[in-house]
Image (cartoon, helix red, strand yellow):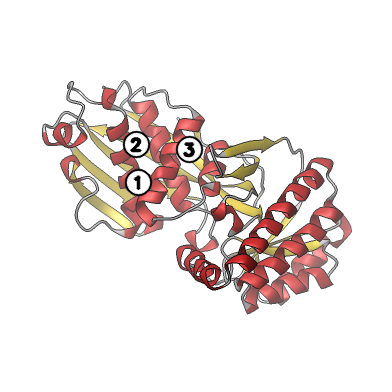
Amino acid sequence: MANLTQIIVSAPGKLMLLGEHAVVYNRPSLVTAVDQRLTLKAETLENSVFELNAKDAGVTNYSKPLSELGKGDIPKGAKFVERAMYNFFARHPQSNRGSINNIDSRLRGNDIIGIRITTKSDFSPLFGFGSSSASTVCTLKALSELFNAKLSCRQIFELSFQTVLDVQGTGSGFDVAAATYGGTLYYSKAGSKTIKPLNLKHLPLIIGYSGIKADTVTLVKQVAEKAKKYPNVIENIYSQIGYLVDLAKKALLKEDYQTLGELMDLNQGLLVSLGVEGKKLADMIYAAREAGAYGAKLSGAGIGDCMIAIAPANKVSGVKKAITKAGGKVVNVKVNAPGVRIEK
């Protein structure tokens, strides 16, 4: 039974540093949390209903009985929050008023009090900063607190990742890890899933937005189709990307940004081989390099969304101007941000 009547939590967005696409196939990656956050307020209701207002995701005044969670026509902007709620109640029978353990029976029997969720995002979902993962993590953190479930970060991560897989059928979990733990992480979904926070004091990234919205699931599927045709070639590319990630981790910890930049360039070359570069991103990346960046690459699934660069302090201004001149928009966010947290 709930101990609180409402709670407010927030989680950060994310940026992939190295390891795109290969991370889906059990290779390591480097991801950092960004300080633009999604904030979620969860309130308990007397009636057994689920209500959601998520204007940034195009959802307003969405409501349904809790007994219908996960059923029917669910708006795209509500899918992750609704599935996260279903998974939470299914996994944590102590969160009900009665003693029935079966989720469907409990919901039909009106054993669970209602929930109203309201979200607000600092960042536009256009940037590809991971609003779906942030909203999923926030939902589970809020429910954990409301119902005194005492979920650990690892448990929130695992349940959030399962929710993402339930909704979209594929995923690597790096964005969920960033939203949960924050900071900069060395992450791999291989085996029991590796999540290693890196103790970084500084990470001087330059971020450019292409103005093109990437469809991550579609791009992952396109690369998977290429892997079916050229399995040995693509597997080798994934392995090389994983090797670069391990080298980049060492460079990051040493604050060796020149080496990091070189590794970013190599990673970009491998992503080009996978066919996910896109002309707009390429223009921005080459402009950054020509303006003096140590290195630059796309960040995310590719074709659109963001690119990142790293440069000497005396070249940062010129690199930003070059990205803008190439048609990009410089996004001023801080990285290495804190993970999911209680705000009120």
Q: Secondary structure at mark 1?
A: helix
- In this view, the residue in front, 10 or 136, is 136
Element type at marker 3? helix
Label 3 and label 1: CA atoms lie apart by 14 Å
Q: At 71% from the left edge and 58% from the top edge, which residue is drawn?
A: 240
Nearest the camera: 168 or 273?
A: 273
Q: Secondary structure at mark 2?
A: strand
Crowd class of label 1 (few under 14; some 14 to 19; many from 20; radius 10 Å):
many
The quarter in which the N terminus is drawn is: top left
Residue 212 horizontal/vertical position (percent): 54, 72
Q: Nearer the viewer, mark 2 or mark 3?
A: 3
Q: Is residue 111 visible?
A: yes
Position of residue 208 measured from the top left corner of the image (x, y, whole percent): 66, 64
Task: Please tell me which residue is depicted at 60% across the width and 38% down the height of the picture.
Answer: 195
Numbered circle sitting on residue 157: 3
- Where in the figure is residue 6, as x and y percent of width and height? 34, 30
Residues at badges 2 and 1 in contact (C-beta under 8 Å)?
no
What residue is pinned by disc 1?
A: 81
Task: Tell me the tag on residue 42.
Answer: 2
Does label 2 or label 1 sit earlier along the sequence?
Answer: 2
Q: CA distance from mark 2 to mark 3?
A: 19 Å
Most extreme residue toward the bottom is 279
Q: Report the number of discs.
A: 3
**Residue at the spot 21% in from the left edge and 34% down from the top edge:** 103
- Residue 166 is left or right of residue 99, and the answer is right
Q: Earlier in the sequence, mark 2 or mark 3?
A: 2
Q: Is residue 122 above or below residue 328?
A: above
Rendered-image quadrant of the C terminus: top left
Mark 2 or 1: in front is 1
**Type of amino acid under label 3:** Phe
Other residues around mark 2 within 10 Å, as few (<14) / some (14–19) / many (≥20): many
